[in-house]
Amino acid sequence: MKNKKLLITLVALVIIVAGAIVVPKLSSDKKDKSVDSKNLQVGVLQFVTHPALDEIYKGVQDGLSDEGFKDVKINFLNGEADQSKLQTMSKELVSQKNDVLVGIATPSAQSLANATDTIPIVMGAVSDPVGAKLVSNLKKPDKNVTGVSDKFPIDKQLDLMRQILPELKTVGVLYSSSEDNSKSQVAEFKKAAEAAGIQVVEYAVPSTNEISSTVEVAVGKVDAIYTPMDNTIASAFPTVISVANKAKKPVFPSVDTMVEQGGLAAVAINQHDLGVATGKMAAKILNGEKVADIPVEEFSKVKPIINENAAKELGINIPDSVAKDADKVK
């Protein structure tokens, strides 16, 4: 009996001693992990300053924070639509040895991909990743690039336009001739619109300098203007609205922030939510997941948004069938 009590006492002592060793070790490991996360770096390259991309960047920060990377160092650079700057900045972010790179908009992601084939890259706001040659397979990225695609729901946007303007016959599509991302959207929109009996007139501009004069020509020939997700147009969107409003022609953009700036309506992706998804994908990589194991996410969360002030100024009545389900900008 004595021996049994002694054995129980010894086992209890062993457990207590082991606990005293293991618990501090686990606590130390957690502490070390926290310290390590503070030493991680994320390089972010934004193509240009405009509200949509600015919202995506805020979302990236929030997405990282949501996943526990509140203290991660973010090295942010903005190319301001200058291709030579994008190339220089991409090399700078690579030389900083960031743990993951984020490219906001297609030109930024392409520039980063040209600068490194080893550092993981997460693309945000890229409508056609395959066409942009960033990936060859959305489900199984075969390079160092994955991310979030914001492929626009052309069919839903076209349906919205026809509900608001039942007599719609001609649409002018305004886009940048230098953005591959835009060209694929225009081709898809044109195919869908013409199948619905709507004539499409393309208006491509090489830079923001030609936007005002191009819109002045367009509003005299079409019933409405459609703008795809295009950074050049987004950068000068107030100019587009100013010219179109004078001619009482509605503008249907593809981004929620552009409706807020005066566009009439869109079935739009929330840019901040898109950024959050991008940030969370970057967090996966920081947590040790490999790019090859992270499929490209096709962000499809969309909702109609209408600008009631724009509708009033243009004398356009928004049908109840549209208004009841839409977010509203006043």
Image (cartoon, rainbow, N blue to C red):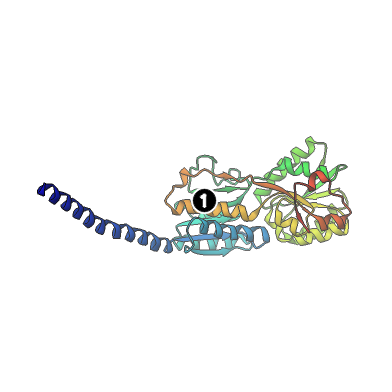
Number of labels in the image equals 1
In this view of the protein, which residue sits in the foreground, 317 or 43? 317
Task: Name the quadrant containing residue 307.
Answer: bottom right
Secondary structure category for the residue under label 1:
helix
**Residue at the top extreme, as displayed:** 195
**Residue 106 in view here:** no
Q: Residue at x 80, y 50 (%)?
A: 225
Q: Residue at x 61, y 46 (%)?
A: 299
Task: Name the quadrant containing residue 236.
Answer: bottom right
Task: Name the quadrant containing residue 186.
Answer: top right
Q: Position of residue 202 (x, y in %)?
A: 78, 47
**Residue 74 in view here:** yes
Q: Position of residue 146 (x, y in %)?
A: 52, 47
Where is 195 relative to 148, above or below? Answer: above
**Residue at the front extreme, as displayed:** 1
The quarter of the picture where the C terminus appears is: bottom right
Few, some or many C-alpha atoms within 10 Å of disc 1 (few <14, some 14-19, many ≥20)? many
In this view of the protein, which residue sits in the foreground, 89 or 67? 67
Q: Position of residue 167 (x, y in %)?
A: 88, 42
Q: Position of residue 111 (x, y in %)?
A: 55, 55
Side of 285 relative to 274 (left or right): left
In this view of the protein, which residue sits in the foreground, 203 or 9? 9
Q: Which residue is mark 1?
A: 281
Indicate the amino acid at tag 1.
Met
Side of 276 relative to 157 (left or right): left
